[in-house]
Amino acid sequence: MLGRGLPDYAKLSGVPLPKPLPNFDYTKAKPRPYRPFRWEYHQTMSLKSLDPDFWLEIESTYRERMTQRIQLFAKHGRRIVDYMPGSEDACKELMEMAIQFLCARYPRQFRYDAWTGVFYNDILSSQSDTRKLHPLVVLLQNVPEDFLITLEDKETGLYVMRAGVSCSAVGWNMSEKIGRPLHQIHGPVPDYKEKMAFSMDRYARTFSYFTQTLQLTPCDRYFSKMPNSKPIQRGSWGFEVGEPLFLQTDEPEWGVRQKQDPDVAISDLYMRVDWQTLRRLPRSRAIVFNFKALFTPLTDFRDEPYIPKLVLKVLKEGKKSIMEYKGTWHVEHKVIPALEQWSKEQEDKGMVPKDWKVRTLDEDPFYPGWQERWNQA
């Protein structure tokens, strides 16, 4: 059922509901192979229009991830889920939009009873009473995505993070970010002010919405005029030993990122992509970031044309401050030799021309031939 009894968010937002997948089998589903690598590599937002079918994505790791999320919340509490007064309407609206999306996209897996307010999850054989649970807890228990809700401060015009659920944070948590405006949240990011804020500025102008009213950052100016009907997406990436979903600087496992282990195996190395979407909620006018951590074995790159050579270029020649921020140093002693080997193999096999000049791929954020492999997976 399409979430009868809920507002028609497709009509309110101008973003159509996703195409239904009536024969969907989550155990066989794979996430799209996001490879958001660019060269020349600059720290920009690299924004793209969002395909409405992929706002939220269910795939084969779903049950495992949901178990992790519930356990993390039980252990860390407000480091995972937190909300401030004034965010109630936005949280409820986001929950309703997510429920409506899931019921439309995966009709065999999710149902909503408008009479009782119960959301049924047939993958987990669970029920969530949306009238008793906080909306963010409903999301935590059912959606494998994290959400950060920002609302405009009427006095300053700045967008401030007022609520969120985040189970896939590495080196930060909700208690450190909530209540802060965007420029403080992004403060540690190299070139944020110079490059990323400018990227948002430029994107705003493409909609002809840019204004000079108020002394706001480019991001705040963009958000103040961002339309409901233009959700966007981007991806960030890094490399990890294993698949750390939620990792804090005060945890023993953080030490893995501070050294180069000569004995770590290539089979234990993963690319982590945090695929992010950004949209305005039509009723509360909140701006919502949602993101999902996806882990891909590094060894998959061996059969993905152009990817080893492109990533190798970024690791070797990328701007030092950006690469230090990404924190790839702890695995580069293993990743770089592997990419060098696979790059040569691809050239020898004719997968990549020997004279190919490294650049951002036309298929960005994917790679040539990805759809055939993804559909076969």
Image (spheres, helix red, strand yellow):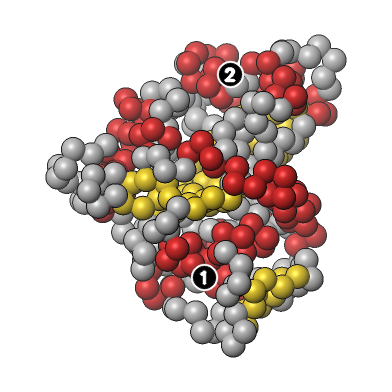
Numbered mark located on residue 96 in the image:
1
Q: Eyeballing the image, is 215 above or below 60?
A: above
* Towards the viewer: 212 or 53: 212
- Between tags 1 and 2, which lies in front? 1
Say left or right for 65 vs 327.
right
Image quarter hosting the N terminus? bottom right
Say left or right for 238 vs 24.
left
Going 72% across and 53% down the picture, which residue do you hit? 70
Q: Eyeballing the image, is 320 above or below 85?
A: above
Q: Disc 2 marks which residue?
A: 315
Amino acid type shown at disc 1: Glu
Q: Position of residue 345 (x, y in %)?
A: 74, 23
Say left or right for 336 vs 11.
right
* Towards the viewer: 18 or 178: 178
Q: Seen from this angle, which residue lies furthest left?
A: 213
The answer to which of marks 1 and 2 sits earlier in the sequence is 1
- Look at the numbered discs 1 and 2 and tell me whether their residues touch, using CB distance below 8 Å: no
Amino acid type shown at disc 2: Leu
* Towards the viewer: 149 or 294: 149
Q: Quadrant of residue 113?
A: bottom right
Q: Position of residue 177 (x, y in %)?
A: 48, 38
Q: Residues within 10 Å of mark 1 (few under 14, many from 20)?
A: many
Going 71% across and 73% down the picture, which residue do you hit? 127
Residue 294 visible to the viewer: no
Q: Secondary structure at mark 1?
A: helix
Residue 117 visible to the viewer: yes
Q: Position of residue 327 (x, y in %)?
A: 60, 21
Going 39% across and 76% down the picture, which residue do you hit? 11
* Towards the viewer: 373 or 235: 235
